[in-house]
Image (cartoon, grey):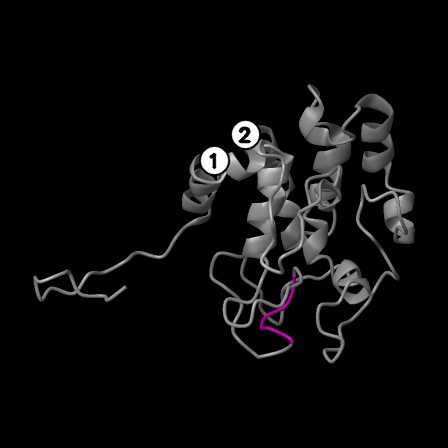
Amino acid sequence: MSPRGAGTGKTLTVAPLTRRDLIRGVLGAGCGLVCAGRVRSDAGNDITEHLAAACGTFCGACPSYIARHSEDERVQRPNPWGDCDGCLSGGVLAPHCRACGIRLCAKGRHEAARCADCEDLPCHRITGLINAGGFAHRKEYLPNLEAMRTMGVRAWVAYEEARWRCPKCRLPLSWYDAECARCGETRPRGLFPVTRDTPRPY
């Protein structure tokens, strides 16, 4: 579509989408896809719910998950914690995820095995993890869990899948990538900012 208004000669300005705008979009237009029981990712694969971790993190942006499930074998990615298929995948888990008290608590209390389903949220386990180390990706846990409640898990995963991709070449980004590992595109503004001094858990 042309950036000029049809027949007016005026240039239209479009404000960048915020995270709230995208959530509203998924809740609106995307609801039909979710209600139909099938959501597709940018990569064309069916979205699965196991990328929505018990604590509220998006496993699809975890560096170890990305390293194990690479979409481009030519791009070397760090794998700080060893192979992991995602918190609720039922597959291989990184050692700290296997032993995670939050995951084990949710698994023992809720059929869906997520803190979003817990009436005690936020509890000392989740707030303790969020505050430990001052890591930026953990600050998203509570907003993410609330979004899961509001949007539904499948819609939330579809939203995060789109959010954590390079805006240029669509390669998945990890939590602390300052730029795309394939094309070098700068990290999108919709993600939390990362600098050289940003604390990282690895």
- Quadrant in the picture for residue 184: bottom right
Q: Residue furthest top?
A: 119
Give the x, y percent position of residue 193.
54, 61
Residue 15 image label:
none
Q: CA distance from mark 1 to mark 2?
A: 8 Å
- 91 part of magenta stretch: no
> In this orientation, which residue lies closer to the viewer: 29 or 85?
29
Q: Which mark is residue 27?
A: 1
Q: Residue at x 62, y 41 (%)?
A: 38
Q: Quadrant of the N terminus?
A: bottom left
Looking at the image, residue 66 sits to the left or right of residue 6; the answer is right
To which residue does mark 2 refer?
A: 150
The range drawn in magenta is: 176-181
Magenta stretch encompasses residue 177: yes
* 100 or 180, nearer to the observer: 180
Residue placed at 62% from the left, 68% from the top?
A: 171
